[in-house]
Image (cartoon, rainbow, N blue to C red):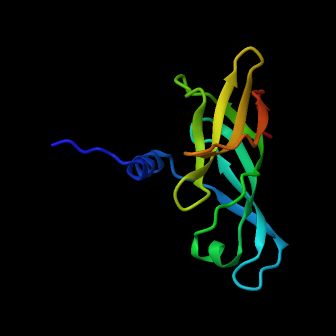
Amino acid sequence: MRFALSGVGLAAAVLLAAPPAFADEIGCVSTAFKLLGPNHKVCIEAFDDPEVKGVTCHLSRPRTGGLEGMVGLAEDPSDSSIACRQVGPIELPKDLDEGGVVFSERRSPLFKRLRVHRFLDKDRNVLIYLVISDKLVDGSPKSSISSVPIMPWNAR
């Protein structure tokens, strides 16, 4: 028996295959008052690279408030910013996934995700993290990058 995935079924399968988001919320700042539901906000979250020990990234991203935001039906804007830093000795795995997704978070009920991809610039000995917002139907060109030079780490 064969099963064919419709457009919605295919979208659901793609979203389920994405890695989960594991970030700690650092804090939020309200940017617009909403009479009903939570205010619009910009929030800062931190996550550690799951494959490269010694690197932590901080994301800032908007959250839509109001009634739609309160019940989870809002589509958050694509604007995001990233800053990654070396926080300990960097340990690169031998089979580092070039362009691999190291963080993923849902930005709308079905079709939009925020993703962080990691690249290695071997010539310059630098890790590069790219944050983008993608949509199955119409992706967003909005992006931000952060570079982490791989440096010796001296514990004090």
- 30 horizontally vs 97: left or right: right
Q: Is residue 106 above or below residue 72?
A: above
- Quarter holding the N terminus is top left
Q: Which residue is at the front of the view, 30 or 155?
A: 30
x and y percent of residue 139 in the render?
A: 64, 43
At a point 77% along the width and 68% down the height, the residue shown is 41
How many numbered circles are shown? 0
x and y percent of residue 137 in the render?
A: 56, 45
At a point 45% along the width and 49% down the height, the residue shown is 11
Seen as rendered, the residue at the extreme left is 1
At a point 78% along the width and 18% down the height, the residue shown is 124
Can residue 154 be seen at all in this image of the molecule?
no
Residue 116 position by quadrant:
top right
Seen as rendered, the residue at the extreme top is 123
x and y percent of residue 103 in the render?
A: 60, 46
x and y percent of residue 109 in the render?
A: 54, 62
Q: Which residue is at the front of the view, 45 or 135?
A: 135
At a point 60% along the width and 30% down the height, the residue shown is 99
Seen as rendered, the residue at the extreme bottom is 35
Can residue 30 be seen at all in this image of the molecule?
yes
Q: Which residue is at the front of the view, 154 or 4?
A: 4
- Quarter holding the C terminus is top right
Residue 143 position by quadrant:
top right
- 11 horizontally vs 136: left or right: left
Q: Which residue is at the front of the view, 35 or 62?
A: 35
Residue 71 position by quadrant:
bottom right
